[in-house]
Amino acid sequence: MNTISITELRSKARSLVRSLENGKAVGLTHRGHKLAQIVPVRHTNGIRSNDPLYQFHHHANLKAKPLSDREMDRMIYGG
């Protein structure tokens, strides 16, 4: 678990959000003492917000020919 201070939180908020999106908890300290633990919300459906399938719309092109299942799998999961 990463740990950041209150001062770092002010300047690295975006980095904190990215860590949470990736499912990582972050410890928060104040004057060298552990103050809190920030944990990501667990979705009841078990799907994380950064799941590749949720990002699939970024690959959409209205003028392109339809993709095969294999091509879609390659775009989503790599390979």
Image (cartoon, rainbow, N blue to C red):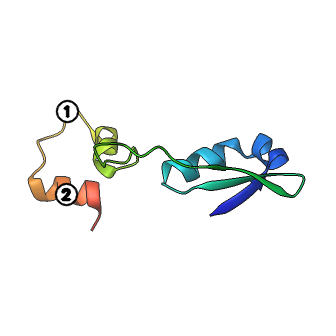
Who's the residue at 73% across and 46% down the image?
12
Residue type for callout 1: Lys
Disc 2 from disc 1: Cα separation: 20 Å
Query: Where in the figure is residue 3, as x and y percent of width and height?
Result: 72, 59
Question: Which quadrant of the structure image shows residue 77?
Answer: bottom left
According to the image, label 2 marks what residue?
A: 73
According to the image, label 1 marks what residue?
A: 63
Q: Which of the image's four quarters has the C terminus?
A: bottom left
Query: Seen in the image, is 30 located left or right of residue 46?
Result: right
Find the residue positioned furthest to the top.
62
Mark 2 residue crowding within 10 angstroms, few (<14) / some (14–19) / many (20+): few
Q: Which of the image's four quarters has the N terminus?
A: bottom right
Query: Seen in the image, is 16 located left or right of residue 21?
Result: right
From what the image shows, is residue 34 above or below residue 45? below
Who's the residue at 87% across and 58% down the image?
32
From what the image shows, is residue 32 above or below residue 44? below
Query: Seen in the image, is 63 located left or right of residue 21?
Result: left
Point out which mark residue 16 bears. Answer: none
Q: Secondary structure at mark 2?
A: helix
Residue type for callout 2: Asp
Who's the residue at 18% across and 52% down the image?
72
Query: Where in the figure is residue 13, as x and y percent of width and height?
Result: 69, 42
Query: Seen in the image, is 68 located left or right of residue 53?
Result: left
Question: Which quadrant of the structure image shows residue 33?
Answer: bottom right
Mark 1 residue crowding within 10 angstroms, few (<14) / some (14–19) / many (20+): few
For the image, the number of numbered tags is: 2
Query: Where in the figure is residue 56, as x and y percent of width and height?
Result: 29, 43
Taking depth in this image into account, of 59 and 23 the one nearest to the observer is 23
Taking depth in this image into account, of 47 and 29 the one nearest to the observer is 29
Query: Where in the figure is residue 63, as x and y percent of width and height?
Result: 19, 33
